[in-house]
Image (cartoon, rainbow, N blue to C red):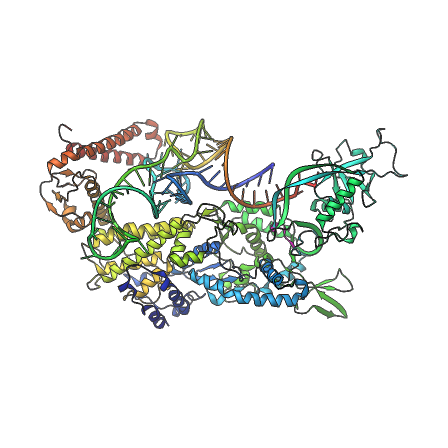
Amino acid sequence: MFDDGRKLVLQYPYMSLDKVYDPQIIEADIYALWESAGVFDANSRGSSEARPKARLRRPSDEGVSPSYAPYSIVMPPPNANGNLHIGHGLTVALEDILTRYHRSRGRDTVYIPGADHAGFETWVVYEKSLEGIGKSRFDYTRDELYAQVWDFVAKQRGNMEIQLRALGASCDWKHLTFTLDQNVVRTVYKTFQQMFEDGLVYRGEKIVNYCTKHQTSFADIEVVYREEAAKMWDIAYPLLADDTTPETLPDGSPLPKEIIISTTRPETLLGDTAVAVNSKDGRYSQLVGLAINLPLMDRDIPIIADDYVDPLFGTGAVKITPAHDPNDAEIGLRHSLDAIQVIGTDGHMTDLAGPDFAGLPYMEARDKVLQALENQGLLRGERDITHKVPHCYKCDAVIQPLLKEQWFVQVAPLAKRAVEALEQGEVKFFPAQKKDELINYYKHLRDWNISRQIPWGIPIPMFQNEADPEDWIFDNRVGETELKIDGKTYVRDEDTFDTWFSSGQWPFVTTDVLEQGDLAKYYPLSVMETGVDILYPWISRMLMLGLYATDQVPFKEVYLHGMVLDPHGKKMSKSKGNVINPLDVVAEFGSDAFRFGIVSARSAGQPQAFSLDKVIAGRNLCNKLWNLARYVSSTAGENGELTLTHPHEHWVIGRLTDADKKLESLIADYRFAEAAELVYGTIWNEVADWFIEASKAAPNPALLRYVLGRVLEMSHPFLPFVTEAIWQSLPWTDALLADELHEEYITYDIEKAQDFKKIQKLVTEIRFVQADLPDQGDYGLIYGADDLIAANVEVIQKLAKLPKVEQGDPTGIRLANSGRKACLNVPAKIVEKYAENIIERIKTTEAEITHLEARLSNQSYLSKAPESLVEESRAILKLKQDILSRLARQVPENG
RNA sequence: GGGUCGUUAGCUCAGUUGGCUAGAGCGUCUCGUUUACACCGAGAAAGUCGGGGGUUCGAGUCCCUCACGACCCACCA
């Protein structure tokens, strides 16, 4: 398997040919190689046979101690019908970094991919295509529509999966789960049945948010409120005057003829069943118990007292329409009022609106109501206001609150449990404050409407007794529209579940915990990574349903990424034309560059711009790695024992070891941007700029290979394609980098590593002086009794590009900062010209010394600051004083 | 009406428990065709860390306040 796969890649002799890494010709092959080798599959670490052993020389193979503790991530399933957008790009990059990192640390890792039927979203697309051929949903049965959409989605599904591969997602395709798969439906029904039996699901006629265009209801959270200019009308409601009406009020004052109410939705007047006032409102309190003769409808409705009414708002009197306003509905319940539905689910007035209005679209009815009121002299005022109007988040139609019989989830007990789990710290959040926001959200949650009147989704497995509407039974034979049981006929509910009801069960559905499938050990998930925008709709539901169904939290940690904005920090939108397609970026710069770019400059929970600059940096890094490998593989010589002798060799191992440790903690804290920067800096500024350059003066092929291997391993989670491509091209590696296990670094000598830091300091100073030399001359280094320089002449000469490094009596420009017994061998005349620079340096150093002395003479600093800090300050002061004295000797007498 | 987040170099962003000289990428400037890489190398310029106040030996970091920006929640008739 490996050999075959290996040849696939090695057909191209990349290393020997191209100076520039070209991701396009290689990425697809690399992904195919991984996939065919099965290294992303779940349980592949479970048995020792499953992994081939790497052949790379290792100092201590015994030192490998892989931990097989499961590590699991479930991908938030992208819409099966759509293309990936920039947010998916970020999701995949983050999740795949985590997955690959933990896989390399020996964890038994799985990254489960998914595809979402995206109920409403997909339905909207399909309904539009029906419109295109002059049809509508009413031309078909629910079952026919379901079958049609299934085919429609099946045609599209492949796209998204190809795109996930292009992004390098190292997921287990064998466990790809579609949200309408049999096992998903089975689990969702199981949960639903249990909830129904526990009384957590109930049938209720309540006010729901209804989109009259799409003919379906929504959960509260799916409604978008927008501030809009509107009109508010004052309408006079005449008091009923009949035999029972008193002539005066209890306090003897005359009875008013009318009450003025204000409304923005006059058409709902037709459904009014009361007028409410605040009992403490002196203007109206004596009217409570009397009645109004409702205009246009000639219906007598009571005047009631309810503390909900704010006396300071409007006229202090409110018309009550229990069928079309959630607050009115609650007042209606408290006062046993009728609910008269005057607006139908189609947005037209119902028969109950009376013969003059029935059948009219509600906006036309509004005009007609106003006209009629005007004619009767009851319209008393009109003014402009702005208020929040609920809209359908998809089509923007105004949401009608109306009464509808639906299935509801009783949220309070589920939310209570979720809050307890959160308060006990069972789930750790990144960023942390999102936990508190979520707790707050749970505390105000109302019951959740889970019925949707669209055909595309999981059918609700409930059947209603034809003869007795109160008699509902659970039955999962949803393929039938009717069931005959005990001589009774039960008819299937035509509705489907809210998508979030099933996706809220995603963690235990995909790992198949309830049926103890082969992924059960991966539950609870190690981390749930997703966008902050679905904290409430998704994370909150997963937590509630997970706790309910499995008795444990569905994930141990939650990482929330913020929205990806355009390069100028603006929200991406089709209308603005600033949408960036991640696959376009991949096509231009490569998958690795995209991943690196989108992960850099990003921290948890923050909306942040997508910066192409960082993608370019990523692309450049890929090229850097590529050429690093080209150099290493071209170095002549035997691949001898891995030994460390020169200071730069000890130093580079030290730097890699430190970076490796640092990386571990950054990954554990989900500090992706810093991790990417660390990898970038380590490879570029340390390995390439210092170690490789130094090694040119002291060849050590075995070490070069070792370092290259570690660099590839370290950067692989971020740049999987280029690192694997290099790995496959190197003659001394085998197997797959994606399947390599991390192990401890070889040991190094700290003293020797320190020596290299001194050499770096010297080289840096030489370069600094060289750059400022008045004559651009090419001068050598002359050193006295300095063992460090003596032992590293070649390396210093190479790094500082010196024509000559020789021992002697140091004359010329003293290298004061590095404190070595050496001078840049510049003629006296030039030194004189250079004096100005030295005086500048003296001034800076003097300022620093003054600053340090001031601090060290501050008594409260000495007594209150930690001892080590004070010591450090003293040491720096001494160093600066030394530098100053050396610099001073440089200045000519008259300077 | 509540709540959250942000404001750091020209641009996009890092900066964990307060520690002294605030970093990166890209961009800008100078020099360099040194055989891994010009998607390169060496060097440089550039920040009163949004304003004000406070706590502290010490504040980008903690507290208060103001300004501007983004987002979330909420039924205001």
What residue range appears in magenta? Answer: A217-222
User: Between residues A320 and A269, which one lies in front from this camera angle?
Assistant: A269
Q: Position of residue A209 (x, y in %)?
A: 66, 51
Residue A219 in the magenta stretch? The answer is yes
Q: Is residue A171 visible?
A: no
Q: Quadrant of the N terminus of chain A?
A: bottom left
Farthest right residue in view: A243
Quarter of the rendering containing residue A453: bottom right
Instruction: Classify residue A398 as left or right of residue A849.
Output: right
Quarter of the rendering containing residue A855: top left
Q: Is residue A759 visible?
A: yes
Instruction: Classify residue A740 as left or right of residue A95.
Output: left
Instruction: Classify residue A684 as left or right of residue B74.
Output: left
Q: Quadrant of the C terminus of chain A?
A: top left
Residue A568 in the magenta stretch? The answer is no
At x 36% / y 52%, what residue is drawn? A616
Q: Position of residue A570 (x, y in %)?
A: 48, 46
Residue A577 in the image: above or below residue A28 = above
User: Between residues A568 and A890, which one lies in front from this camera angle?
Assistant: A568
At x 71% / y 64%, what residue is drawn? A473
Quarter of the rendering containing residue A837: top left
User: Between residues A42 and A392, which one lies in front from this camera angle?
Assistant: A392
Q: Position of residue A343 (x, y in %)?
A: 73, 51
